[in-house]
Amino acid sequence: MPGTTRKIDVAGIHLGEEPSFIAIEVKCGLDGRIQDVPRQLEEYLDIFDPDGGGLRPDVAESYSRVCTQLLALGLDAPDPRHVTAGMPVEGLVVLGEYNQRSRLLPRAHALATTLSREMYLVDFQDDDYRIPPRGEWKLLGQSSSPT
């Protein structure tokens, strides 16, 4: 993003009933930064959707152009018409084979409850690294105790 040194891990479009722009932060293994990931993700959400009114017009235009280019190259991409200014922006933390007994994960959940934006969590514990349907995402902050 122009004007920032922040680099998000993954950005994408969720094509549900109402398409949304998804900012995704990935943590794998025993990454100790998990305890701070909600604050990090909130910073990204503030960049893409600074006033809570949806995706910034310049980001929507740029992302739509990228989708058009990917499709022209014969690669998979969302339909560029689904990428619009003002579309909802959501934050998703993806954990890859993360130790659920970690003492740091509850800190992430606790931090998430203090922030102004909701964000979600998906945990991959097997070899299927596809992001599940939106209804299967967990609200980050729902659980603050190790399992």
Image (spheres, rainbow, N blue to C red):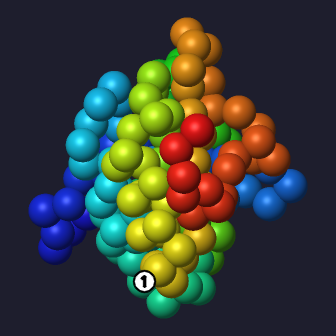
**At 39% across and 77% down in the image, what residue appears?**
46
Extreme residue in the right direction: 17
Whether 143 is drawn above or below 127: the answer is below
Of residues 107 and 84, the one nearer the viewer is 107
Horizontally, is 4 left or right of 37 in the view? left
* Left/right of residue 99 with respect to residue 129 in the rendered view: left
> What residue is shown at x 27% (from left), y 36% (from top)?
31
Query: The disc labelled 1 sits on which kind of residue?
Result: Pro
On the image, the x and y values in percent for residue 128 come to: 61, 14
Q: Callout 1: few (<14), some (14-19), or many (20+) C-alpha neighbours within 10 Å? A: few
Image position of 61 with respect to 76: above or below: below
Residue placed most toward the observer, 86 or 140? 140
- Residue at 17% across, 69% down: 4
Q: Quadrant of residue 102?
A: top left
Which quarter of the rendering shows the C terminus?
top right
**Residue 112 in view (yes/no):** yes
Task: Left or right? Give the position of 125 relative to 44.
Answer: right
User: Relative to residue 16, is residue 55 depicted above or below?
Assistant: below
Q: Position of residue 135 (x, y in %)?
A: 81, 47
Q: Relative to the observer, which residue lies in front, 81 or 13?
A: 13
- Give the quadrant of the N terminus: bottom left
Q: Residue at x 56, y 34 (%)?
A: 123
| Residue under pointer 1 | 50
